[in-house]
Image: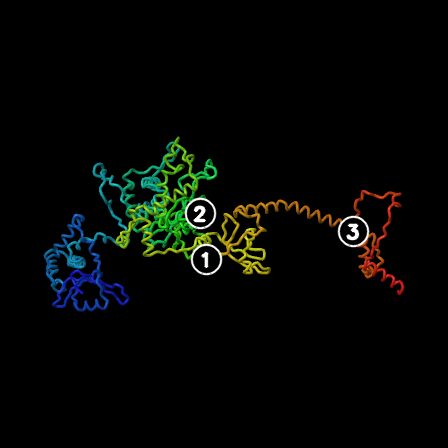
Amino acid sequence: MEFFVNNLFDRRDDEAKVVDCDRILWINRDMDLVVTISIIDKNGLPKFKSLSAMELEIKNGSLMKREYDPYTKFMVSDDKLTPKEIRLRDHAWSLINEMVEIEPNVYDPTERYRMIKKACDETGKGKNSFYKYLHYYWTGGKMVNALLPRFRKCGKPGEKKNPKMKMGRQRETKKSVSPEMEGVLVNEGIRKIFDKVIRDIYLKINRRDSVRFTYTQMLKNHFAIKTEIRNKVEIPIIPPEYKVPSITQLRYHIRTHFPHRKRLVAREGEVTFSRDFRPLLGSETRKATGPGQIFEIDATVADVYLVSSDDPNQIIGRPVVYIVVDVWSHMIVGFYVGLEGPSWQGIMMALENTAVNKVEFCAQYDIPIQPEDWPCHHMPESFYADRGEMESKNADSLAKALGIKLKNAPPYRADLKGIVEQQFRTLNLTLQPWMPGAVKKEYAKRGGPDYVLDAKLTLKDFTAMFIERILYRNNSHYMEHYPLDKAQAKDNVRPIARELWFWGVAHNHFLKEIHPDIVRLNVLPEKKVTASREGIYFEGMYFGSEELVRQGWFVKGKSIKTVIAYDRRCMNHVYVKTDNGRSFIKCFLLDKSSRYRDLSLEEIKESRYQEKLNRSIYRSTELQEEVALSAKLEAIVDKASKRMDEEIDTSLTKTERKSDIQKQRAEERDRIRKAQSYELDKSQTVTEGQEDNITSNDTYRPKSKLGLLASIKTKEERNYG
């Protein structure tokens, strides 16, 4: 390694920590000598060393060359120095300029002592001054400016100055009027008052009180000597102006004791500072290294009023717009225009649109495009969104099933999603001249036109306009401030979203191709439910599927817990998630729940609530009838009990009462049969005199088998006892 004068070398220990730093002052290669001085040791002096020994230390790694010289800060021109600094520097140089030229003798301790003793005798200065200036000169790289005074190191570290007399420029009143009007010396007591009023008033968050207001409050609260009643108001009386601190002194205290960043954070708040005042040194585009690494998504309310597609006389308000933007290429990869949200329902539609084929999507709005005009039908590695929609169980399902990371900006930090926010601003402003019903600030003037009544566009019309604007933005807009890198510049890539997209896909991308149905499945809300022999039960409805029947789900005694996805806008189907959300089984609403067909979940909940409410209202009537029934039944029982008490033969034993039950049953049945027998056409009754004219038809009436057996038994008992 080559050695040169003023080279710096760090000396490191076994743990690779810097323990010293030597500067080369003089080299003699023939004699293998080198003179160095430590720039870390404040009392360090030049030392003679072996040049070969230093080379060996460099090879061993204990000595390493330092590239940055900390004393380059003294390399300034004289026009940037004060007259006092120049005067002190030149005086120090006049004391040592002759001896530093005598090399290498001046580096020898004995020779140096003789030179300094001689200079002390000639100038009357102490030897410490010479040693100090020599040390400054050698450690500072043998520059004259290294002798500049170290004013910043004056005073005791950590302690404030307490001057005996007022510092700074004299007041005109002292010079022209009276020496007594020189003003107030700011001592420790006044500094404490300054600190208190600054913290309590000037730095109070979201107040933004001025220094003038803070100064006035300070005089009123801390420097009043008495009070007077003026117009029934107590007025504080302060001393003359030259006997109180000035507003300039307060401003100086704020400037020197409270850094600008601390003042901004205290007055504006940490969130506002981070959003509006933080340094803007990076590039948001460079957060991603290729297409699909980060998609930003956000929503806003469009600045236009729309009308109903069924009745143009009905104004339906302003639509909600969701936009999904690729951070790396600034390509708009998906969007949604509707009346949902901002909510999960809206963001769900935007995520679904991100994965669909854009040719088929645009065809729904009679806009023919080629696949290369909007080649975006992918999912990213991660989504970056606001807190809210992406902090939910629905979002967690999307992340787990599809392997997509979800990141959320802190509260009130829309600036961290600057790319998508700028897209909103650009699209709103560029579409405004063509949109009847657009919100315009100048229309808010008194007597101005009412932009709400100018509304003519339907939701489909506005969506078609939005698609056309996105196609222009993606395919033709030249982004002047896009930070192209060297590889892109070498390939002559223009900062147009589509060109950047294709170039990024060819070189390094993070895009995922996922079927739109799987995306839809995992953006739909999910619920853990139970399947029984009656079907899958959810919110009072039953669902089933032939596939699940074949798998043996709906069998008595078998209960299965499963996770379903559902679209709350129409509950005709639910979807049983399988393979961790990468597949599904479609289930249909069963006939027993057909009354809920074509209804939304909200309508179903309302219907069930009304049913429950009606049951609750009818419950009082039902309870009354239950009480009445109980009373009626008890009356019947009481009547029977009384009759039994009157007619029962108490002489019969229990055995006698229980005997011949079958016989008695048969006799009772015959009696009931006769009583319940039909007689048709009862209006034709038989009168006396007509009976002889009626021919009797004797018919055979078979006896009951039970009756026959009973008569035989009775006869046998009579004959044989």
Left or right side of 196 for 164: left
Residue at 58% from the left image edge and 45% from the top image edge: 610
Residue closest to the eye, 199 or 465:
465
User: Residue beneath label 3, please?
Assistant: 640
Mark 2 vs mark 1: give the one in front: 1
Q: Residues within 10 Å of mark 3 (few under 14, many from 20)?
A: few
Q: Is residue 577 left or right of residue 175?
A: right
SS at circle 1: loop
In terms of sequence position, does the residue under pointer 3 or pointer 1 come before the other? 1
- State the image coordinates of residue 705 (x, y, percent, origin top left): 81, 59
**Res. 491 visible in picture:** yes
| CA distance separating discs 3 and 1 | 71 Å
User: Which residue, given by chain and number where applicable, does mark 1 sit on?
Assistant: 582
Q: Report if residue 265 is visible in the image.
A: no
Q: Position of residue 554 (x, y in %)?
A: 57, 58
Q: Amino acid at mark 2?
A: Gly
Quarter of the image for the N terminus: give it. bottom left
Q: Is residue 304 above or below residue 161?
A: above
In the displayed structure, 35 sits above or below 368; it is: below
The crowding category of the residue bearing disc 1, from other C-alpha atoms within 10 Å (few below 14, some 14 to 19, many at least 20), is: some
Q: Which mark is residue 346?
A: 2
For discs 3 and 2, the disc positioned in front in the rendered view: 2
Q: Foreground mark, 3 or 1?
A: 1
Alpha carbon separation for disc pair 3 and 2: 71 Å
User: What type is the residue that disc 3 sits on?
Assistant: Ala
